[in-house]
Image (spheres, helix red, strand yellow):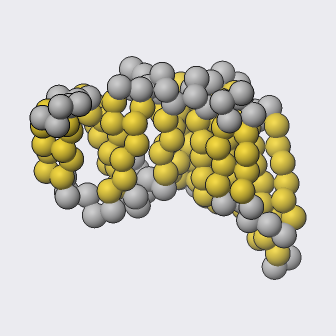
Amino acid sequence: TQLAVYDTAGQILQRVQLKNENPALITAGKNMIIYDIGGKKLDVYNSFSPVYSESFSHPILGVSASDNGSYAVLSGAKNYRSAIYVYDNNYRPIFSHSFPTEYTTAIELSRDGKKILTLSHITENGAYLGSAALFDVTAEEPIANFKFVGELPLSCHFASDGGYMILT
């Protein structure tokens, strides 16, 4: 697998050989984030070179990014089912939250990087119990929680007006 970056005239700016088994790429402002789904390493590139790299102790399950260059990582943490980590556009951690009983399956960072929406589920008495939580990255507790009895939340997105959509 390789990353190739082109300018608007079709000229190659950068070509990098990658060792990812299940690569994924998203953009975060002017940067690109490449990670291995199920792997533990995340790399940030600008148009010309790598600018940041981080390894996680648990597999990366997903990444979401904002227009301002901040990004969020869905992974795990010791003694927790799942965890989210949010970084500013200078790669500094600004927020984290661990889920002791829920399996978090999707995250979405708002366009301004100030809110994060998480989708999780557990099984209770043999039935799915899905949930969504909306966090402000400056506060520990969610500002909103939603439950979906018998439904599995699959995907979420922020709208341009700040509202959000959840697919179950």
Residue 4 locus on image (x, y percent): 18, 44
Residue 72 locus on image (x, y percent): 51, 37
- In the image: residue 130, left or right of residue 82: right
- In the image: residue 32, left or right of residue 127: left
Q: Is residue 50 visible?
A: no
Tell me what residue is drawn at x 66 percent, y 21 percent: 138
Residue 67 vs residue 18, the one in the foreground: 67
The quarter of the image holding the C terminus is: bottom right
The quarter of the image holding the N terminus is: bottom left
Q: Is residue 166 visible?
A: yes
Q: How many marks?
A: 0
Q: Is residue 149 above or below residue 14?
A: below
Residue 155 locus on image (x, y percent): 64, 55
Tell me what residue is drawn at x 33 percent, y 36 percent: 32
Residue 79 locus on image (x, y percent): 58, 55
Q: Quadrant of residue 157?
A: top right
